[in-house]
Image (tube, rainbow, N blue to C red):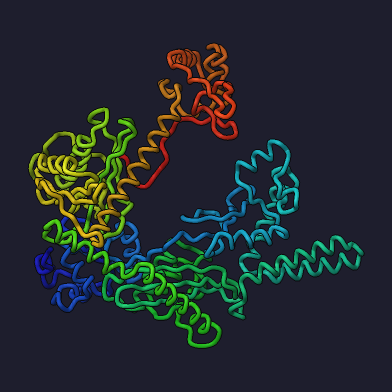
Amino acid sequence: MADPSSYRPKPGEIPDTPGVYRFRDEHRRVIYVGKAKSLRQRLANYFQDLASLHPRTRTMVTTAASVEWTVVSTEVEALQLEYSWIKEFDPRFNVKYRDDKSYPYLAVTMNEEFPRVQVMRGQKRKGVRYFGPYGHAWAIRDTVDLLLRVFPVRTCSAGVFKNAARTGRPCLLGYIGKCSAPCVDRVSADEHRDLAEDFCDFMAGRTGTYIRRLEQQMTDAAEEMEYERAARLRDDIGALKKAMEKSAVVLADATDADLIAVAEDELEAAVQIFHVRGGRVRGQRGWVTDKVEEITTGALVEHALQQLYGEEKGDSVPKEVLVPALPDPVEPVQEWLAERRGSGVSLRIPQRGDKKALMETVQRNALQALGLHKTKRASDLTTRSRALEEIAEALDLDSAPLRIECYDISHLQGDDVVASMVVFEDGLQRKSEYRRFQIKGFAGQDDVRSMHEVISRRFRRYLAEKEKTGEWVDDLPEEGTTENGLKDDDGRPKKFAYPPQLVVVDGGQPQVAAAKKALDELGIDDIAVCGLAKRLEEVWLPDDDDPVVLPRTSEGLYLLQRVRDEAHRFAITYQRTKRAQRFRSSPLDDVPGLGDTRKQALLKHFGSLKKLRSATIDQICEVPGIGRKTAETIAAALAQAAPAAPAVNTATGEIMEEEEPGTTGSGGEPVTAGAPDERRGQET
């Protein structure tokens, strides 16, 4: 724990200008980013008497080991740079709103030749029109189902669309009139795009035009005695009105606005946002955050605005944003919002009328969200702190282990041996820093040797990073241990640059001894090691013959169990991925110079490996991109590979036609062996 006076800048060093500052810990990791109108005045607040600081701020300044700053010209530039650095470094002490789910949007892919209406989550894509967010995906589907009657836009996937175009038969929606079926040329691309534009206009709130147009068409059809057409138009009008009723009018002047409300206490804050378009509530979302420093409601609003509009441009930023308190100062934030939108944005507190009444509704939602969150987490911050203190006391540590790493080994009867590393910080998962390993030093089943190898590799790279940053000046225990991709002085824990205070291994005395031996061989003596045995949930320490037994009701034991179980889950998931990849392998993988594209061409041409194996070299040469030399290599590789055993129908005992496993997927599409599923964490 550092003394803030040890790194406090000298008087006169800090400029009295706008800027952004970063606190770093002893490992050069950025732990806090802030902005200030005057860097000198703002930073002085952190170096006062520790007793007068907010508890979380006190923890931050004692965890930090240095502070640095960047001077900018205006407060708007400071706001932009602060947002960029928070996104880049993910500092642990900054306010970060925890969104408990990825909110779904109604999206129209206007960037495609035939735009598609669908539910989308996550990162927004260029050229796609978004409406929402919605609380539930089923709410989007209900709305779309009603609107497709009037705007029969394509909703099918690319595969279904291509299959319909190939067969000349539309899908079910095309037959029942809820798709204009551009796949079979019932409408042209331009006509279908016009339908999509009308759909977007209706969703954007311009509803009156279409209702009046359909009503006039219905009247004309009735006068011309086309009663069936008039009945269809009547039903279309009913569908549109029903879709409109799902979002009742809340602002009579057809306002486009976002309303943000904040409910807070000493430790946490909840934010609720209502998106109003055309006077109707089109979407709602909410976040919760820990208050990591003494912060005002205006500052919480500012952070919410950064998260809400940091990646948005144009009409996604509304003309009007209503908030419970204004940031101080408000002008830079307002100017930043105007830059994002491309025109003026009104940021204000509603004082009277419908907007104030709606803000009270949003505020009630925020209070309810905070209460529900507290009920779920049951004083989670206090519980986590108590758990870390119990672990420190039980293991005789100098301080609470703010960063815990846990390792587990997984295999199937000695095959596909892998290991996992999971990270918990302040008692919470840090999934971006999970890592996974393939055991390379030996073959077969030996959990103890595997654990020794994994711990050695992980901390050898930690020492390599310390040498690169100048923290470690001695020779490394082994040569060739540095790794491409490690970055200097960027503040982020790339690869294995950030050490834990506690290493937990899944196992008993042998695994703990192997982990401790690996650390001793590397000369690391400031990291504690323990093991958690599954049978009796005993905690084993190095060189101790008897385990530490924590009470069954201990929060510390519960946290260790969570860490161990997460490591086991992550390891077995990776092991299954490796096993599935091995089963999907093909003899074509061993042909040098034969990539995925030509593998797919071969399998598509012949239909299966069985037919490819029986083909002549001249027949193989008929495949586009396959020369004679390559064909000879393919034939030789297939001749050496033993064919798979025939498949048997277990219900009837019938021997089925022989097919190589992994050669075709569902629908007869060729499948090639490729990279395993991308999962969180990196393979090492």
Residue 446 rendering spot, x and y as whole percentages: 23, 33
Which quadrant holds residue 439? top left
Which quadrant holds residue 655? top right
- Determine whether 460 is above or below 267 in the image: above
- Determine whether 448 is above or below 466 in the image: above
Which quadrant holds residue 615? top right
- Which quadrant, please, contains the N terminus? bottom left
Q: What residue lies at 32% left-to-right and 61% top-to-bottom?
A: 86
Residue 606 visible to the viewer: no
- Which quadrant, please, contains the C terminus? top left
Residue 29 visible to the viewer: yes
Numbered label tally: 0
- Determine whether 140 is above or below 279 in the image: above
Q: What residue lies at 66% left-to-right and 51% top-to-bottom?
A: 154
- 580 on left or right of 73: right
Q: Nearer the viewer, residue 39 or 238?
A: 238
Q: What residue lies at 34% left-to-right and 59% top-to-bottom?
A: 87
* Residue at the outermost left position: 474
- Determine whether 256 is above or below 70 in the image: below
Q: Nearer the viewer, residue 313 or 681?
A: 681
* Residue at the outermost bottom position: 352
Residue 306 rendering spot, x and y as whole percentages: 39, 67
Q: Nearer the viewer, residue 267 or 498?
A: 267
- 32 on left or right of 544: right
Residue 509 rendering spot, x and y as whole percentages: 16, 43
Residue 473 rendering spot, x and y as whole percentages: 8, 45
